[in-house]
Amino acid sequence: MPPWGFWILAVPGFALLAWRLQGLGGRSRAGAGAAFGLGLFVPTLFWMTEFHAVGFVAAALLEASFMVLMAVAVPPRRAALAVPAAFVLAEAARGAWPFGGLALGGPALGQAGGP
């Protein structure tokens, strides 16, 4: 999330997720997606605590649930190829639901400080 310059973590983060999802069952993929989603959205949405702590927790859990669905949708044998496509679909859904979506906190915003 800008202006911290953490954009470089997007590349190894997605590579680690794709590697971790290889060969896992549905429940394990859901757990990996939850860890990925919480690792992504807890730091990037923390600013919400300035307004409401419970709202921050609810938003972080809701946004992380999109990453859980993304991870479950990835086929276990083709994770490296499917993660980018599944992530684009998850981001499209996250940008549309609920109430018109919450575009904040995603990796695309982190590229503001990138090359």
Image: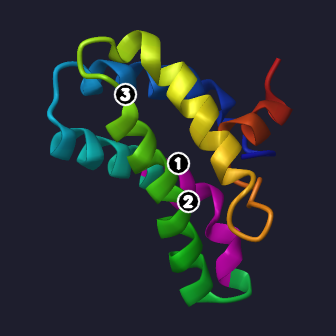
Q: Earlier in the sequence, mark 3 or mark 2?
A: 2
Q: Could you tell which of marks 1 and 2 lies nearer the N-terminus? A: 1
Q: Main secondary structure of the magenta part?
A: helix
Q: Are marks 1 and 2 in contact (CB under 8 Å)?
A: yes
Secondary structure of the residue carrying numbered label 2:
helix
Mark 1 Cα shell of 10 Å, populated few (<14), some (14-19), many (≥20)? many
Q: Residue at x 52, y 48 (%)?
A: 40
* Percent x, y of residue 11: 55, 20
Nearest to N terminus: mark 3 or mark 1? 1
- Residue at (24%, 21%) from the top-left corner? 76
Tell me the kind of residue under disc 1: Leu
**Quarter of the figure that contains the C terminus:** top right
The residue located at (63%, 56%) in the rendering is 44
Residue ID at (25%, 38%): 29
Please check the rendered image and state whether residue 42 is part of the magenta-colored stretch, yes or no.
Answer: yes
Instruction: Reply yes or no: does residue 88 show up in magenta.
Output: no
**How many numbered tags mark residues here?**
3
Please tell me how crowded label 3 is: few (under 14), some (14-19), or many (20+) other residues with Cα within 10 Å: many
Q: Describe the element under mark 1 as helix, strand or loop.
A: helix
Q: Is residue 9 visible?
A: no
Labels 3 and 1 touching (C-beta < 8 A)? no
Q: What distance separates the C-alpha of mark 3 from that of mark 1?
A: 18 Å
Residue topped by disc 1:
40
Report the side of 12 relative to 9 (left or right): left
Q: Which mark is residue 74?
A: 3
Nearer the camera: disc 3 or disc 1: 3
In magenta, the rendered stretch is 39-49
Left or right, 91 with respect to 32, comes to right
Residue position marked by numbered label 2 in the rendering: 63
Q: Position of residue 81 (x, y in %)?
A: 44, 10
Q: Is residue 49 above or below residue 52?
A: above
Q: Look at the numbered disc 3 and give the secondary structure of its residue.
A: loop
